[in-house]
Amino acid sequence: MTREEIYESVKEVLVEALGVDDDEVTPKAIITSDLGAESIDFLDIVFQLEQAFGFKIAQGELFPEGVASDPEYVQDGKVTDRGIADLKAKMPHFDFAPVEADRKIESVAKIFTVDAIVSFCQRKLAAA
Amino acid sequence: MRWLWIDRIISLEPGRRLVAVKNVSAAEDHLHQHFPAEGSERVLPIMPGSLVIEGMAQTAGILVGHAGAFKEKVVLAKVSKAELTADATPGCTLRYTANLTQRTHQGAATEGKVELRGPADDAFTEIGAINLVFSHLDHNGAGEAFPEHNFVFGETFKNLLRNSGIDPDKVEPLPIEA
């Protein structure tokens, strides 16, 4: 599958899971603030990606989990150097630039872009 | 009134499919308010679509709960899709078929078919589809703690299972795919 084809499939999943219009889904769109995803939608997106692409996604593989409550990763409401380094190594599908620019924990939501999900799927398919 | 929107489980394939029926009765009080007579319009009792969704949620929720031997607190988290093309009125029977499509430690997804048999019909006709996402409450993303007691699958549900020939206390949990 080309990246363009993967993007189209991801777009279909997001349109279905989040009830958004086709044209709202853009590569740079953030799935929470731009597309209105809530916590349960993350699980739904994982389920629908598994069905669309036929691979299994382990818990915490696509979206990071428990970061905010881990003192190694977050101190005084800010992501630590260790946190960034670990997350980068574990989750190469994300672009961490927004977190590097502003270490506040709230910045982490900004990395959940449509592009990141496409990159994740591309890596999974390449590894299969 | 008991919050039970299915009358009987008619078949169960553990971890795969559960089929249940609901008989719509004129003795159900709420039907007479939905919709009441108004002006020259006569009373028009219709089972609310939201309660049809609840019936499917109970059907699918039992399927998900059974797969985990009723240890998990299975709660409806999302209605992914709900389409209904006909109304259920007193004398009708609704048949809910829920298929388990995914199940993880965090939750499960189901796809469901709704069928209707009218008072004068011999057979069921498909009238809609309801797809749902369930959360396993003790594995919620927020990390919140809930009481140990399983308040989701109480005696009302257990009695329904027993009356349908399923012993809720003798169920082995099915493994979750890694």
Image (tube, grey):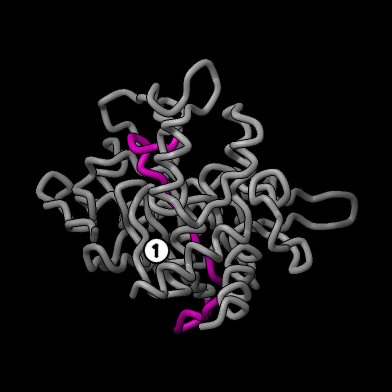
Residue B27, visible in the rendered structure:
no
Q: Is residue B72 magenta?
A: no
- What residue appears at the point 28 percent right and 49 percent down from the top-left corner? B65
- What residue appears at the point 48 percent right and 37 percent down from the top-left corner? A84
Q: Is residue B139 magenta?
A: yes
Q: Position of residue A31 (x, y in %)?
A: 64, 51
Q: Position of residue B178 (x, y in %)?
A: 24, 58
Residue B50, visible in the rendered structure:
yes
Q: Is A38 positioned to the left or the right of B16 in the image?
A: right
Magenta residues? B120-141
The kind of secondary structure element at disc 1 is strand
Q: Amino acid at mark 1?
A: Val
- What residue appears at the point 42 percent right and 59 percent down from the top-left corner? B109
Closer to the camera in the image, A48 or A103: A103
Residue that badge 1 annotates: B21
> Outermost residue toward the right?
B39
Q: Is residue B74 above or below residue B166?
A: above
Mark 1 nearby-residue class (10 Å; few <14, some 14–19, many ≥20):
many
Q: Position of residue B56 (x, y in %)?
A: 46, 58
Q: Is residue B14 above or below residue B143?
A: below
Q: Is B154 positioned to the left or the right of B142 in the image?
A: left
